[in-house]
Image: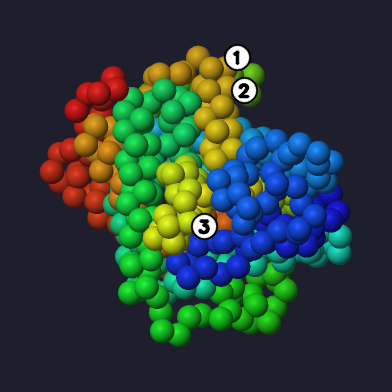
């Protein structure tokens, strides 16, 4: 694994972009055409090609790219299993959490953050892996260089509104696809539409909202001049204590009863319809390890939407007109999240298939799915993060903007869910795709 993150200015080197997105710098001249990030002689080259052209010898970076694709897929499968087994992919779990009628999502979230912090603490102190941790932190905070309080609060609040409407977060949409949740396709279409429209307007929006005095130190432990582990382990222990307390006050069995799920003891672990949310949270948190060691990045899910909808930005004129989309279009630094969510779908199919629960979860209405998807992606792109990016990764890495983003997400989600409850539409779910 040594040397994975230190291949010069290759496909995972990021610079701060004017729009606040992570951007990849130019690659070595010795890299093959398949590894290059839009080489000057071929602007149309995509980063998922086979990496070889006629007459070229095999580039060593091609093997690295294959490793990254496989790692992303495996982590996605594990994430999909965790989301499905914890039942947080059920729109009812999301909405009920926002009105404090369920705590499954919170238990899984806190467990994932704590597990990630413990794992990253170990990586940060081992000499042979410390470099990967440092690079991952640099890559993570690069997207905040042009972000401030306004974009973080407004974007995160908007994301929370969309989350309550469609009953999902960006990565969770793909778990819902795998579980055949009705109308998930409309949440996906809304997300893609949101990513596209935001990307087309991003240079205008972010030019008018970027802070006059950008923050120079984005992580709390660096600001305090402390080693990461000095803050991470105490916070992880605190979060674990919080999960234990919540479980004592609100047992998981209560949430499963509300979802009409009966967990029988005569089935093996994978055949169970539901796991304790903290067990699934541990699985999700452990995904940080291979992502850091191989990708030099951390868990996130919303950027993949921008990558997918940016594939039409192929000419120099279009790239100049839509710089945000142009930067999102190519390179494994962008595409790995696409492979991640493909794995999420596969993991959810596997998990639900083993428990014979595919198609048993009700979905939200078409308008809620479509509008919620648009708002969810608009908010996540404006705030440069979602529940995975800001929540599990950002809080886990002590990014101070993430500690503002997460409460803002829940503020938007809670206010929307309570409004839906007051108007009698919170518990309106459908049995078939297309139902309104």
**Quadrant in the picture for residue 410:** bottom left
Which comes sooner in the sequence, label 2 or label 3? 2
The residue carrying mark 2 is 270
Residue contact between numbered discs 1 and 3, judged by CB atoms under 8 Å: no
Q: Residue at x 33, y 60 (%)?
A: 201
The residue carrying mark 3 is 327
Q: From the image, which quarter does the C terminus lie in?
A: top left
Give how far across and how far down residue 396 sits, in percent: 59, 60
In the rendered view, tell whether residue 13 sits above or below residue 254: below
Give how far across and how far down residue 35 sits, in percent: 70, 48
Q: Residues within 10 Å of mark 2 (few under 14, many from 20)?
A: some
In the rendered view, tell whether residue 340 sits above or below residue 285: above
Q: Nearer the viewer, mark 2 or mark 3?
A: 3
**Quadrant in the picture for residue 343:** top right
Which comes sooner in the sequence, label 1 or label 3? 1
Q: Nearer the viewer, mark 1 or mark 2?
A: 2
Depth check, front residue: 321 or 108: 321
Q: Residues within 10 Å of mark 1 (few under 14, many from 20)?
A: few
Q: CA distance from mark 2 to mark 3?
A: 40 Å
- Residue 266 has which mark? 1
Check disc 2 and report its element: helix, strand or loop.
loop
């Amino acid at each position: 694994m040594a040397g994975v993150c230190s291949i010069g200015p290759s496909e995972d080197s990021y610079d701060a972009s004017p729009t606040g997105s992570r951007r990849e710098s130019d690659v070595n001249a010795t890299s093959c055409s398949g590894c290059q990030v839009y080489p000057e002689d071929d602007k149309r080259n995509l980063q998922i090609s086979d990496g070889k052209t006629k007459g070229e010898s095999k580039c060593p970076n091609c093997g690295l790219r294959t490793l990254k694709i496989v790692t992303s897929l495996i982590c996605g499968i594990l994430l999909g299993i965790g989301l499905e087994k914890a039942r947080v992919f059920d729109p009812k779990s999301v909405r009920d959490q926002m009105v404090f009628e369920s705590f499954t999502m919170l238990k899984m979230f806190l467990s994932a953050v704590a597990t990630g912090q413990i794992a990253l603490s170990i990586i940060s102190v081992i000499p042979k892996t410390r470099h990967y941790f440092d690079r991952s932190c640099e890559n993570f905070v690069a997207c905040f260089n042009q972000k401030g309080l306004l974009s973080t609060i407004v974007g995160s609040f908007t994301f929370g509104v969309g989350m309550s409407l469609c009953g999902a977060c960006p990565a969770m949409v793909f778990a819902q696809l795998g579980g055949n949740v009705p109308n998930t396709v409309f949440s996906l279409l809304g997300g893609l539409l949101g990513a596209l429209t935001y990307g087309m307007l991003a240079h205008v929006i972010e030019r008018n909202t970027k802070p006059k005095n950008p923050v120079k130190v984005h992580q709390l432990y660096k600001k305090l001049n402390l080693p990461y582990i000095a803050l991470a382990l105490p916070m992880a222990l605190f979060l674990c204590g919080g999960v234990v307390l919540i479980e004592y006050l609100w047992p998981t069995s209560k949430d499963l009863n509300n979802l009409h799920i009966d967990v029988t003891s005569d089935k093996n672990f994978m055949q169970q319809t539901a796991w304790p949310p903290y067990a699934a949270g541990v699985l999700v948190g452990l995904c940080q390890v291979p992502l850091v060691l191989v990708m030099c990045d951390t868990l996130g899910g919303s950027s993949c939407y921008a990558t997918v909808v940016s594939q039409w930005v192929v000419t120099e004129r279009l790239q100049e007109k839509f710089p945000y989309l142009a930067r999102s279009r190519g390179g494994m630094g962008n595409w790995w999240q696409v492979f991640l969510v493909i794995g999420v779908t596969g993991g959810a199919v596997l998990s639900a298939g083993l428990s014979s629960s595919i198609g048993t979860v009700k979905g939200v209405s078409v308008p809620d799915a479509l509008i919620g998807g648009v708002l969810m992606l608009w908010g996540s792109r404006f705030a440069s993060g979602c529940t995975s990016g800001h929540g599990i990764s950002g809080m886990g890495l002590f990014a101070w903007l993430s500690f503002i983003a997460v409460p803002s997400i829940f503020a938007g989600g809670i206010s929307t869910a309570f409004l839906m409850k007051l108007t009698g539409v919170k518990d309106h779910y459908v049995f078939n795709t297309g139902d309104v």
